[in-house]
Image: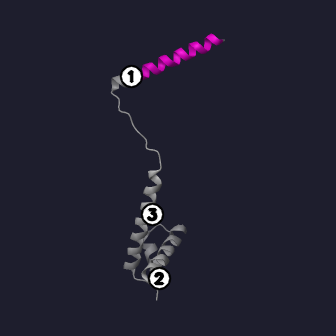
Amino acid sequence: MLNRTNHSTIIKEAINFYLDKGVTDKQDIYTKVVDQLGVPISTVRRVARDLRTELLQKIQILQSDMPKTSTVTVTPLEFLRLQDRTIEEKRLNLALALRRF
């Protein structure tokens, strides 16, 4: 008889097997695992919930290393000033480039 940890590991492997095979319907996966392993569907659902929790924790860890993007809020007037400054900078850079030739 398998203990709960080994049982859960085997069920997780079966769930992952069907996910890797491209099965996308949750109920279909549960049914296939029940048929394959002969375990109650309630056990499969519990293990699937544990697997989801583990995967979400791993995703959160991986996302925490990603650089955070920041946004700057500007008023419409500030935006126009920034846009005008950018246009002026482009004109100045173009004038300086043309002087070199």
What kind of residue is marked 2?
Asp
Mark 2 or 3: the one toward you: 3
Horizontal and vertical percent for residue 101?
Answer: 66, 11
- What range is drawn magenta here? 81-100
Disc 2 to disc 3: CB gap under 8 Å: no
Instruction: State whether residue 32 appears in this view.
Output: no
Q: Residues within 10 Å of mark 1 (few under 14, many from 20)?
A: few
Horizontal and vertical percent for residue 49?
Answer: 39, 70
Mark 3 to mark 1 CA distance (whole Å): 45 Å
Q: Residues within 10 Å of mark 2 (few under 14, many from 20)?
A: few
What kind of residue is marked 1?
Leu
Mark 2 to mark 3 CA distance (whole Å): 24 Å
| SS of the residue under disc 2 | helix
| In magenta stretch: residue 84 | yes
Q: Which residue appears farthest toward the right when viewing the image? A: 101
Residue 45 against residue 80 in the figure, above or below: below
Residue 29 against residue 63 in the figure, above or below: below
Q: Which mark is residue 35?
A: 2
Q: Which residue appears farthest toward the bottom when viewing the image? A: 1
Q: Which mark is residue 80?
A: 1
Name the residue nearer the viewer: 93 or 62: 62
What kind of residue is marked 3?
Leu
Counting residues from the start of the chain, the first of labels 1 and 2 encountered is 2
Counting residues from the start of the chain, the first of labels 3 and 1 encountered is 3
Counting residues from the start of the chain, the first of labels 2 and 3 encountered is 2
Residue receiving disc 3: 55
| SS of the residue under disc 1 | helix
Q: Which mark is residue 27?
A: none
**Magenta stretch, main secondary structure class:** helix
